Image (cartoon, rainbow, N blue to C red):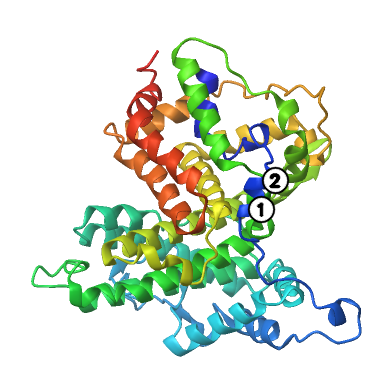
Amino acid sequence: MRKHIVLVLLVPILALTLISCDADMRSSFANFLGGLGGNVYVDGGLVEPNKADVKAATDTIAGLGSGNGAQVFDAGDDGKTDTFGIEVDIPAGVTTVMKPQLKEDQDKLKDDLANTLNSPQQTAELKEELKKPVSDPGRIEAVKGTVEVFNKTIEALVDDVVDADLKEALGKLALPTVDDDDVTEGDVLLVQLMTNLISNTIGTLDSIKGDGGHLGDNVQDEENKNKLLTIIDDALFTAQIAEELSGAASIDFSGQLDLANLMSELNKSSRASRDGDDDDFDISDFIGSINNLGPELVKMFGLKKIDDGYGWESGGYRKFISTQQAYRGALEHALSFAGKGGHLGNLENRGLVFDGSTAIKYLIAVAVTEANTWNADNTKQMITASVNANTWIATGTATEDTEPGEPDLGDIDPEDFGKYLYNKDTTGKYVKQIFTNTKLINDVAGITQLSEALDAFLKDDFDEWFDELAGEGD
């Protein structure tokens, strides 16, 4: 029973033991990297690559959080700020926040970033630039302060919005506190984009509120639905940048994962578990995919080889969770507003690449952010212990004789994570929405078999599976 619960809940994290290749399925996916193939003349050194876009983007990022881009509080302030569109108390110790950019500045940054991402050479340079540490203490404090005020703003916005679906999606935008000084230019960019997103969202909702006076009151009125498109576009662009910063954008899950078969195996395992049968996965069936994806996933998680094991350097875990939270929050933000405005069928053409990979990346983000909310220390130990007990995941050296190692979790009981999710919402609505979102994402441009499998799971197996989270099915 415990194996089954942990398997289902953490399948994106531990997917390395569940993955298989299928050439026919693989050929049905669009190439996730799209038109990002190299230029033969540039690759051969015959032509100097154009770096104007990446230079423009990095020049702008270097100025974020300072000068006119920052708001400094002093002793004369009354302890409140409406920097992001809603008045909130200034958290203790916060002296500086990053201002939302003016619309023309937002558009320029988006254009420069979008043009940069259309070139593999410029994209590579951008990623290196965004890894650089911020040396200006003022900008570091601005990032820290912005996250604090941002989260206060999210709380106030959730309180003001009446619509239950929007309340839930908005709440997911809250970012992890920056409690270290290892801030990078990528951190600055991500926080600025999230700041722009929430400010623009508040501005749009404020423009359509009705007699009730609450933000989002008239969000489903026909005359207001198209106004939601700007929110959707902002959210999807933010998700795309978070995906790039996390390293997930370069991982071709769609070329390695037979997602429909994975869902089928999970459902089969679920039924076998309920019947008392032991239906473990055989690692030898998935060697190729494990060895290809394992090192990439460990890298995406930000784990480094430290002494004799793997772990996070200072600030590494926080950066990992921050990008995953931003990716998940922005995606759910877009899905929620797209649903309210009747725009779900149009998401494929609104900036972010949707395919089977997107569904997996979303599930990874959900798994790690939910686990982090449950218990950050436990989550860090569960991930590092799992990798250190199975270093072949990080090195890509699994063989048919490889036996999965048992991680040393001390007194941590992973099943408590399932109980946490169950007790969070005993109706299952919260957790069911996660699977529904996965299906919505896959419906855009994924594979039909996966959507069918998810639909069957939601209709036929979810309720019983959900009760198992708290041991009710034992």
Q: At x 52% / y 22%, what residue is drawn? A: 269
Task: State the image coordinates of residue 202 (x, y, percent, origin top left).
Answer: 30, 72
Task: State the image coordinates of residue 465 (x, y, percent, origin top left).
Answer: 39, 26
Whether residue 315 can be seen here: no
Q: At x 41% / y 76%, what residue is drawn? A: 73
Q: How far is mark 1 from mark 2, CA to CA?
A: 6 Å
Residue ID for mark 2: 23
* The disc label shown at residue 27, or none: 1
Q: Amino acid at mark 1?
A: Ser
On the rendered structure, is 433 left or right of 366? left
Q: Amino acid at mark 2?
A: Ala
Q: Secondary structure at mark 1?
A: helix
Task: State the image coordinates of residue 6 (x, y, percent, origin top left).
Answer: 53, 27
Q: Are marks 1 and 2 in contact (CB under 8 Å)?
A: yes
**Nearer the observer, 60 or 127:** 127
Above or below 8: residue 100? below
